[in-house]
Amino acid sequence: MQQGQRLVVVSNRVPPASAVTPQDGNGSAPVGGLVSAIKPTMEKYGGLWLGWSGRSTQRRGGYEPTVSDLGPVQLATLDFAEEEASMYYIGYSNRTLWPLLHSFPGRVVIRHDTYRFYRRINRRFAEALFSVLKPGDQVWVHDFHLFHLGFELRQLGWTGSIGFFLHVPFPAADIFSILPWSKDTLEALLHYDLVGVHTDRYLRNLHDALDSELGGSVDSSGVYSYGALSSKLGVYSIGIDPSVFQEKTMLGSRSLTEELSLNLNPSHRLIIGVDRLDYTKGIPHRLRAFERMLEQHSNLRGKVIYVQISSPSRTRVPEYIQEKEQVERLVGQINGRFSEANWVPIRYLYRSYPQNVLARFYHDADVAMVTPLRDGMNLVAKEFVAAQGEENPGVLVLSQFSGAATSLVDAVIVNPYDVDGMAEATYRALRMPLAERLARSKSLMKDVFTDTAASWSESFLDDLKLNSRRAPVN
Ligand code: GDG
């Protein structure tokens, strides 16, 4: 960032004011990777953060955002009418784009009315943003809810820099082309000066989609041109602030065994899973793998406990209601099948915890199963690694379909669709000798300290500065 330049971040949601001030960082922010990643950026640079308040009102809101001044950070929020929230957020964002971008074509709901609302809300965001922008501001837009915001902002006359980062995967071109508005969406992206994704593969997929749908060209510095539009496309691997998850920060928080009132002896093993309750996270496959492991290795019965923390997410979206029911049914079946008087194999917690408590839970677990069917990056994997001590580190079992697997190569990498394979890999993880655990943990820790939240935002914002004003002035 240049001296005196203000950072203006836009994302679908902003956390409540109480969760943004650094001294209250463990407050009740909406749980999810985007907020986890942007919060440290805002704390570092200060600036303005605009997003939906999460409230829906009876009537359509005005275009003026409500701004609260929190010292270095200003929070600007918009309210939406009930119908707008339902069509733009539940409808197009969560039932069309989310499954499409995660390569679940069978779940994609195509409706023209929800797309119209999505476009309208992107326009509303642009108008609200335009009303608070000052010359020289650096605008950074986050995620798929706002693909068209850059285009709309250009329509309003903004010629300053605008960057866009996609937190979820960009799928293979043939999947993306299922979207009837795929061409419009790709064109909209080219109004940003810089478009960032997490991995080389997502970048290749984006290039393929642009090639097949628009047919522009890319130069040696990664700038894609199509007619009068051009945009730099790049890879920026997101990370965490590892110091937040290190041992010293856990002092004082209750251990996992205390929290669950478990009476364990040294031969007991704990497996942990922490996810938003989302069908992309592969929780049912993971539960089946755990069940298979208990079937195959009866020596584990009575000795291993799998703790699944599922934070409530998108609770009004029908697919999420079904997923919750499926997970709860499976937990009940497996516990019903294997429990003994003094041992329940799965502890299922449908709730969220403050970050320092989660850090302690990661630290206390012997194995983390981070096994999404598809995930842009997955920060839980990195948080687990950072929380391991130097003496007796736990083992990360990680899906090959997470962006995190491209850098965390020393995790135990699994295919989450292969339940038998995942069961065996988890068994191996539980029995892994200390020397191997130490070697893997050391290498993983290095990765987590290399790609951090700070390095991610710094490299993105530096590139944005270098690539500004490519988009034409409308
Ligand atoms: C999206 C992309 C990408 C979870 N439970 C609690 C809690 N969490 C926090 C974790 C972590 C975050 O939520 C989840 O981040 P992930 O990256 O694992 O997943 P998504 O929410 O799907 O994030 C993802 C990310 O954006 C960033 O670009 O990696 O691929 O899907 O930080 O700690 N936090 C608290 N209590 C909980 O109970 N406080």
Image (spheres, rainbow, N blue to C red):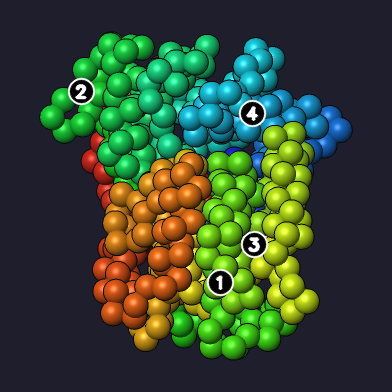
3 or 2: tag closer to the N-terminus: 2
Which residue lies under the disc numbered 4?
95
Q: Amino acid at mark 4?
A: Arg
Relative image position of residue 197 (x, y in whole percent) = 36, 39
Secondary structure of the residue carrying tag 3 is strand
Secondary structure of the residue carrying tag 2 is strand
3 or 1: tag closer to the N-terminus: 1
Which residue lies under the disc numbered 2?
218
Q: Indicate which label's residue lies in the foreground, 3 or 4.
A: 3
Marks 2 and 4, how far apart at CA: 32 Å
The residue at label 4 has a CB less than 8 Å from ligand 1: no
Q: Indicate which label's residue lies in the foreground, 1 or 4.
A: 1
Q: Indicate which label's residue lies in the foreground, 2 or 1.
A: 1
3 or 4: tag closer to the N-terminus: 4
Q: Amino acid at mark 1?
A: Leu
Quadrant of the image occupied by residue 433: bottom left
Secondary structure of the residue carrying tag 1 is helix
Reply above or below: 218 against 312.
above
**Which sits in the foreground, 450 or 116?**
450
The residue at label 3 has a CB less than 8 Å from ligand 1: yes
Marks 1 and 4, how far apart at CA: 40 Å
Secondary structure of the residue carrying tag 4 is helix
Write the residue at 46% across / 44% down.
418
Which residue lies under the disc numbered 1?
300
Relative image position of residue 375 (x, y in whole percent) = 47, 44
**Is residue 174 in view from this perspective?**
yes
Ligand 1 - quadrant of the structure image? bottom right
Relative image position of residue 31 (x, y in whole percent) = 62, 56
- Quick check: marks 3 and 4 in contact, CB under 8 Å? no
Marks 2 and 1, how far apart at CA: 54 Å
For residue 473, the mark is none
